[in-house]
Image (spheres, rainbow, N blue to C red):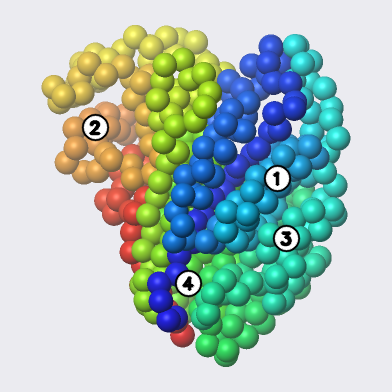
Amino acid sequence: MAKPFSFFLVTDTHYFDSSFSRTGPAYEERSRTDQKCVAETPAIIDAGFKQIAEDTETDVILIPGDLVYRGEYQSHVGFRERLYKLQEQGKKIYLITARHDYGGESAEFIDDKVVPVKGMPREELRDFYKDFGFDEAISEHKESMSYVAQLTDGIRLLALNCDGDCKDFKGIWENQMEWALEQIKDAHESGNYIFAMTHYPLLPFSAIMHLIGDAKLTDWEAVATKLADAGVDLIFTGHMHAQAVTEYTTEKGNTITDVQTGCFVGCPCAYRKVTFEDSNTIDIKSYTIDDFDYDKDGKTAEEYFKWRFDRMILWKMEEILPAPVKKILDKFTLKKLGRLLFFKVDESIKDKLAVDVGVELVRNIFLGNEPYVKGTPMYEAMAKLLKRLHFVTRILGKKLGKKNPILADIDTFVLSMIGDEEQRDYNLKLTINRG
């Protein structure tokens, strides 16, 4: 590599075209249960793409899928227009598509009705986006809509579509993996570093994600092992709308790092700039959209995204929790909870409502860099709470652990999700293996 090379990573844009209706009870019913913004996507994406376009030193943008909301044909038209505008501003774009980019749920929202609109057939996506990676590919696996592209001298991208069977299997087909391994070998033999991108995370990025089916690729351990042992040590992913950096090491001692990026149109509204500083060092920095042209009810962009996220969690809590439990959470401060269970809460957090803490802890999983590590007042309060409830969690662990070993120790399971000692989900440097 003669000089430093950088690219932007943007994922889960979920564009919903401005020509569609998005007001009234039907839209509000959908909106309050969703982390991402939808009505706001034209404004958010235009603002975010403007920020990216202003960086004249970085010409490449990678987008690993979920380009539009629910496969609306017109949304694809509007999104592609924005990509062409970026091209006119000197950007080269490489993308793959994912499950939100096709299917039978395309609709707009008119008053209290969800009205179907024309959708995009999956088989048309490759040619529709041919100018954004596919036609420049040095190798292509057309059956899966995957390809390899030469991003710059000495660096290749392995763009793996992981739609699988477009139903339950969300992963890499056997013949697709065989093709990928051939491309990895060819890259190494020709003196190129090759990294990958998929839509679904390769690795579960938090303890809870082991229990969520689509939070990682189907057969993720087998896929991670094959890629890592073949010499791929870096992959960029999306889908879960979370900021996370996760590592996996195979039995042979090869490590692959999954850099997952948050949703571009919802909390944390993040994108990344990745710079190959030299032959062995990558610098990764994260950014958010500063502002966008929309009525945010006096909120900043950051406040607006958090408000949308918190509203979703509160609604889910209403659905899931029994009314008496929710009532207690709504009224109990941590100090009252501590008194009830005979443990002391630090003065700095004693007035926090239990419900607010619950929402924050969930939000932090997706924001990344979870702050409550050992020694912080919140960690100590949670540890004391779990200790008081251990007679319950121990029984639960014995039962649940039989089916999901990760749940065998409930206390450790919970505490692992609230604090991240490494604090590198946003900014980090990686040492890569150039082979």
| Front of the two marks 1 and 2 | 1
Discs 1, 2 touching: Cβ within 8 Å = no
| Residue name at image x 80 percent, y 67 percent | 142
| Residue name at image x 79 percent, y 33 percent | 106
Q: Earlier in the sequence, mark 1 or mark 2?
A: 1
- Mark carried by residue 233: 4
Q: CA distance from mark 4 to mark 1?
A: 34 Å
Relative to the observer, which residue lies in front, 51 or 64? 51
Q: Quadrant of the N terminus?
A: bottom left
Where residue 255 sits in the image (x, y, percent)? 44, 71
Occupied quadrant, residue 411? top left
Q: CA distance from mark 3 to mark 4?
A: 28 Å
Q: Earlier in the sequence, mark 4 or mark 2?
A: 4
| Residue name at image x 44 percent, y 47 percent | 243
Discs 2, 3 touching: Cβ within 8 Å = no
Tell me the element at label 1.
helix
Q: Earlier in the sequence, mark 3 or mark 1?
A: 1
Q: CA distance from mark 2 to mark 3?
A: 50 Å
Q: Which residue is mark 3?
A: 131
Tell me the element at label 2.
helix
Relative to 340, is 203 above or below? below
